Image (cartoon, helix red, strand yellow):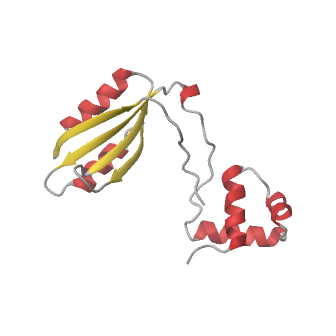
């Protein structure tokens, strides 16, 4: 069941600033502080709110190179390979996909050498048949906050 209007308002405020107090959220949406506290605890318990974090500017941290890597994986070992790849510090996302490829990996790097190392590591994994790497030239939008 989709969240009600009050929960959506709470989530939108938390997405825009997770440091807001319960009191600030309550004042902003016109409900009691206790209502906000109860609803946030319920959203956490249901797993809708997984954790709280800061959104960092990766380029300002030196991660100027981003890539999308398509994977073709054999013998029904998709999940095992994806889980292994997901452990890399440079990997931001691993996705099962439809189409010509079996999976996609989104990763960011400080240098071409790091990108090269990850691709060679992936290619050396058992059951990885091939990769097709797309270097991202320009990011128009990257925002995973969705309500």
Q: Is residue 12 above or below residue 34?
A: above
The quadrant in which the C terminus is found is bottom right
Q: Is residue 135 above or below residue 29?
A: above
Q: Residue at x 58, y 26 (%)?
A: 60
Q: Is residue 112 above or below residue 94?
A: above
Q: Is residue 118 above or below residue 6?
A: above
Residue 112: give x, y in percent of width and height: 36, 22
- 147 vs 17, left or right, is left
Question: In this view, which residue lies farthest toward the bottom?
Answer: 1
- 33 vs 82, left or right, is right
- 6 vs 144, left or right, is right
Residue 64: give x, y in percent of width and height: 48, 25
Residue 73: give x, y in percent of width and height: 19, 49
Question: In this view, which residue lies farthest toward the left?
Answer: 75
Q: Dividing the picture into quarters, in which one does residue 26 lie?
A: bottom right
Q: How many marks?
A: 0
Residue 94: give x, y in percent of width and height: 37, 48
Q: Dividing the picture into quarters, in which one does residue 133 lie?
A: top left
- Nearest the camera: 137 or 15? 137
Q: Dividing the picture into quarters, in which one does residue 48 lie?
A: bottom right
The quadrant in which the N terminus is found is bottom right
Q: Residue at x 20, y 36 (%)?
A: 123
Q: Residue at x 79, y 60 (%)?
A: 25
């Amino acid at each position: 069941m989709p969240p009600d209007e009050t929960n959506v308002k709470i989530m939108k405020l938390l997405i825009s600033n997770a440091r807001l107090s319960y009191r600030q959220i309550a004042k902003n949406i016109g409900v009691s502080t206790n209502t906000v506290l109860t609803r946030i605890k319920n959203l956490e318990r249901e797993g809708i709110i997984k954790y709280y974090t800061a959104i960092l500017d990766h380029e300002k941290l030196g991660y100027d190179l981003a890539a999308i890597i398509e994977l073709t994986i054999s013998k029904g070992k998709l999940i095992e390979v994806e889980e292994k790849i997901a452990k890399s510090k440079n990997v931001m996302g691993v996705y099962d996909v439809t189409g010509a490829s079996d999976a996609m990996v989104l990763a960011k790097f400080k240098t071409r050498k790091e990108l090269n190392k990850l691709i060679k590591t992936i290619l050396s994994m058992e059951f990885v048949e091939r990769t097709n790497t797309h270097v991202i030239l320009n990011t128009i939008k990257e925002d995973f906050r969705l309500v």
